[in-house]
Amino acid sequence: MRPFAASQATLGSLDGEAVESLLGVANDISLVVDDQGVVCDWSSSLDELPDDEMAAWVGQPLVDLVTPESRRKALGLLETRDAANAEPEPTSPTPRWRQVNAVLASGRELPLLLAAVPLGQGRTLLCGRDLRAIAALQQRLVDAQQAMERDYWKFRHAETRYRHLFQVAAEAVLVVDATTQRILEANPAAARLVGDGGPQGLVGETFPLGVDTRSHEALNNVLAGVRATGRAEQVRAELLDARGEVVVAVSTYRQDNVSHFLVRLSQAAPDTLAQPAPSTSSMLLKLVQSVPDCLVVTDLEGRVISANTAFIELAQLTTEEQVRGETLDRWLGRTGVDLSVLISNLRQRGAVRLFATTLRGEYGAMTDVEISATMVPHGDRPFLGFTIRDVGRRLSSESRNKKELPRSVGQLTELVGRVPLKDIVGETTDLIEQLCIEAALELTRDNRASAAEMLGLSRQSLYVKLRRYGVGDLPTDADKAS
């Protein structure tokens, strides 16, 4: 350290306040200790240190205010002070800085860089600098080094696993430079498939290799396509010496801003291998989708779960999503009647056959159909299956009713003038009413409640008409009495 040339003339007139200001600017903490190493006074320019914690140092030996590992350094400071006091002034040694960890009254540690300056009369000034910022940086550096060490070993372990898998893989794998098409790495399986020696014998060779001329050109085209688009592709290639055909799959990746090809070669399966036989369930599913009759599956409330293509076409729709979740009653002829009759019979008997009705398309087309249905148990939620067949053509060539009117149109017109119109209309009305009741009973399988609902009659009115026309097996009064 170079001293002032004329310190007495320059600094001799400094008073105590000036010295205190000078120490506040030069030091973070200043301590004055006596010849026994006990703190006599202190000053600090650190605003974040409470005065009461620093005031607790007064009267305490310096070695008691530092951590155990810093006590030897604190004693070294005092010994340096004693040595400096023993030397003549011209040869006073340069103050030596020592790093110690002081302990505040709250238990926090305060890293300090201290140097001892003798003041005379057995007193020593300890100039201190706060090292907390440097200590924080050092801790961050240590944490970063430890993180780098952990990442390094993680990458080393990953590379070890990759190397092991690369070597023991049964599939031939090559790593190829995308620019020069030079082979950078090859596993033993690749050496056995396309090389003559070990894996190192392939390193440095130009890919493709080990294939015939036609396959060589096809592989070059694939490599060019993958290089241009970045999408993985594969092609078949024929090995030299008629050793068989392989499937070559090429993909690309980047490492250190350089593109590489990952090439995998596997034995190609012969094209003549028989395809596995389809399962029974898959065949049945294809049959259901392609059968010309409409097939619909619903829940117990009649909401459509699934329908085949024939039903979608007959309902004048385009996709199955349009019918899924809808009520089947939406397309049946007699809204609110036919579906309830069908479901009622399915609940009672489990199956319905040849139920005649009509089916409405989305655009108003009406089709005469026959419905056969069944209930299928399925856990707690059975479902209903409906087979709907278009019988419009068949009905057009057949008689729609087995019973003919007793009089033709000509016969009815001949009665005009001889029989009152009221009698002609009454006879015809009675016959039509009887035929409608018989048809309703036939459609509902003799379910009188459903037949009454279908005809728009009350149950009592239907019973009256049944007795009137002698239709059905109604109990007589004698039977009721017995």
Image (tube, helix red, strand yellow):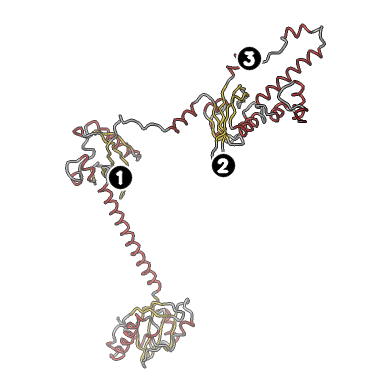
Question: Residue 127 versus residue 105: which sits nearer the camera?
Answer: 105
Mark 2: amino acid: Asp
Residue hosting label 1: 259
Label 2 to label 1: alpha-carbon separation: 59 Å
Image quarter of the C terminus: top right
Disc 3 residue type?
Answer: Ser
Q: Which of marks 2 and 3 is nearer the N terminus?
A: 2
Q: Quick check: 423 left or right of 148?
A: right
Q: Which of marks 2 and 1 is nearer the N terminus?
A: 1
Quadrant housing the N terminus? bottom left
Residue sitting nearer the eye, 332 or 261:
332
Is 39 drawn above or below residue 173 in the view shown? below
Work out which residue is located at the far bottom of the displayed protein and give it: 121
Looking at the image, residue 84 lies above or below residue 107: below
Q: Which label sits on residue 388? A: none
* SS under mark 1: strand
The amino acid beneath tag 1 is: Ser
Residue at the extreme left of the image, as rendered? 197
Mark 3 — residue? 399
Reading the image, the residue beneath label 2 is: 380
**Residue farthest toward the front in the current orientation of the protein:** 482
* Residue 47 at x, y percent in the picture: 47, 77
Residue 171 shows in the view = yes
Which residue is at the front of the view, 464 or 53? 464
Residue located 32% across and 38% down the image: 226
Is disc 3 placed on a helix, strand or loop? loop
State which quadrant residue 420 falls in: top right
Q: Residue at x 33, y 61 (%)?
A: 150
| 432 versus 211 height, above or below | above
Give the quadrant of residue 465.
top right
Across and down, in percent, residue 413 comes to 76, 8
**Are the two marked residues, 1 and 3, in contact with CB atoms closer than 8 angstroms?**
no
